[in-house]
Image (spheres, helix red, strand yellow):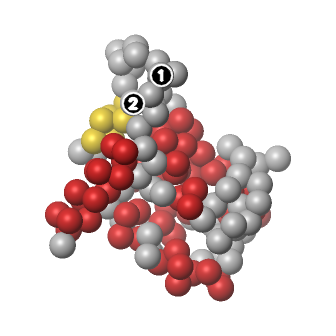
């Protein structure tokens, strides 16, 4: 079962790869546990994961609620409540942003639990970059 999830995550990530505008200087590549990360900063890596294999944009947009709360709302609430986003994404913390949507979010824990701490921190950095 884990192999199927891993394979589908890899295929999903590969199908979302952006072409054209990526920098081809790979001398400063960052490496996450088990997967090379082409993003140079944690924020860029977080955005890449958020929009790609994390499939987070299906429910979360920068400044408007879709299925889940906006990225700005998530960042503000986690900052104000001093929440731990990475612990939540590992499935080890209660929801603090929109508990009514928690059951929908739980389906994504299969993806986020497989991510490294570096990748989860990168997602957190990307989300916090939307604070106004």
Is the residue marked by circle 1 packed among few (<14), some (14-19), or many (20+) residues within 10 Å?
Answer: few
Q: Which numbered circle lies on residue 132?
A: none
Q: Is residue 102 left or right of residue 15?
A: right
Name the residue: 44% across, 28% down.
19
- Percent coordinates x, y for residue 56 in the rendering: 53, 59
- Percent coordinates x, y for residue 106 in the rendering: 47, 78
Q: Taking the image as drawn, is residue 122 in sight?
A: no
Name the residue: 41% across, 52% down.
53
- Percent coordinates x, y for residue 97 in the rendering: 68, 73
Name the residue beneath numbered marker 2.
38
Q: Nearer the viewer, mark 1 or mark 2?
A: 1
Q: Is residue 18 left or right of residue 131?
A: left
Name the residue beneath numbered marker 1.
20
Q: Nearer the viewer, residue 71 or 41?
A: 71
Q: Nearer the viewer, residue 77 or 24?
A: 24
How many numbered marks are there? 2
């Amino acid at each position: 079962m884990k192999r199927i999830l891993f394979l589908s995550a890899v295929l999903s990530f590969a199908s979302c790869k952006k072409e054209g505008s990526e920098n081809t200087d790979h001398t400063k590549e960052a490496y996450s546990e088990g997967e090379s990360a082409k993003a140079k900063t944690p924020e860029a890596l977080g955005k890449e994961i958020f929009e790609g294999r994390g499939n987070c944009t299906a429910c979360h947009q920068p400044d408007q609620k879709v299925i889940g709360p906006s990225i700005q709302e998530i960042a503000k609430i986690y900052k104000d409540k001093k929440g731990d986003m990475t612990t939540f994404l590992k499935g080890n913390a209660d929801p603090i942003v929109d508990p009514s949507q928690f059951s929908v979010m739980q389906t994504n824990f299969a993806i986020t639990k497989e991510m490294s701490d570096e990748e989860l921190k990168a997602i957190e950095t990307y989300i916090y970059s939307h604070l106004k």
